[in-house]
Amino acid sequence: MNQTETGSEFAGKRVIVTGGSTGIGAAIVRAFHDAGAVVRILDLDTDGAGVLAEELGETVTVGKIDVRDRSSVEAAMAAAIAELGGLDVLCANAGVSTMRAACDLTDEDWDFNMDVNARGVFLTNQAACRHFLDTGHAGCIVNTASLAAKVGAPLLAHYSASKFAVLGWTQGVAREMAPHGIRINAVCPGFVRTGMQDREVEWEASLRGMTPDEVRQDYVNQTPLGRIETPEDVAGVVVFLASDAARFMTGQGINVTGGVYMG
């Protein structure tokens, strides 16, 4: 969606994007900015987020957050809401991955993925929902899940578990918030070309005895639409889910996979 298509709806809308400095998060920030929204990026990488904010202009600002830590989340969300003068949309996008065979996983692998991907969504969603309830404002939330939240991924079992948790949370809290007009949905991207994917391709190539190019070609072969997904492919769906066009959608995990998964 571009500003011409959605500007009247999103002009002046207040949006928070976690993990918005790079990859899918940066594309979400750009998409909402282009649609006329005022955006607050919350990220551990404030330097990277600052570069993006400087590029996009004064309607995009930056705050620091560690989504694993309740005190950090509550302080960052409160400061962001104060800076924005309220909140209309939260995009809980911050996420991480590591790759390892299930029997070789360490406690650190498990905790890192669960703490960022699942706990981070829980804490940021909770802060946003409390604000919406306290103010009587029917805002909305879009969480970033994954194809791995629909189909367990080999070498990513712990990551899949964390993303399945995101979908379970999204559905449960959506039911609780629906009577208040608050909508919560999730997007489930597939093989998206990001810095995270670049790292995963190297890991997977090593673990599977392949070259990185062969791994990427395998991703393309699994994708009926025949190419690697871009962050912009995901961002457009996020903006849609936050729009009035999706006003009767809540508790959904929307596949944005190029057809890799169609369930």
Image (cartoon, grey):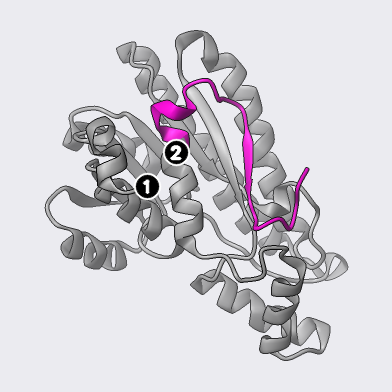
> How many residues crowd around disc 1 within 10 Å: few (fewer than 14), some, or many (20 or more)?
some
Q: Vertically, is 192 above or below 186?
A: below
- In the rendered image, the quadrant that contains the C terminus is top right
Q: Amino acid at mark 1?
A: Met
Q: Residue at x 26, y 50 (%)?
A: 34
Query: Pointers 1 and 2 in contact (CB under 8 A)?
Result: yes
Q: Position of residue 73 (x, y in %)?
A: 39, 41
Q: Main secondary structure of the magenta part?
A: loop
* Residue at image mark 1: 1
Q: Residue at x 52, y 28 (%)?
A: 184
Q: Position of residue 104 (x, y in %)?
A: 83, 71
Q: Vertically, is 51 above or below 15?
A: below
- The residue tagged with tag 1: helix, strand or loop? loop
* Highlighted range, magenta: 241-263
Q: Furthest-top residue in view?
A: 179
- The residue tagged with tag 2: helix, strand or loop? helix
Q: Amino acid at mark 2?
A: Phe
Q: Position of residue 231 (x, y in %)?
A: 48, 61
Q: Vertically, is 121 above or below 96?
A: above
Q: Residue at x 48, y 28 (%)?
A: 246
Q: Furthest-right residue in view?
A: 103
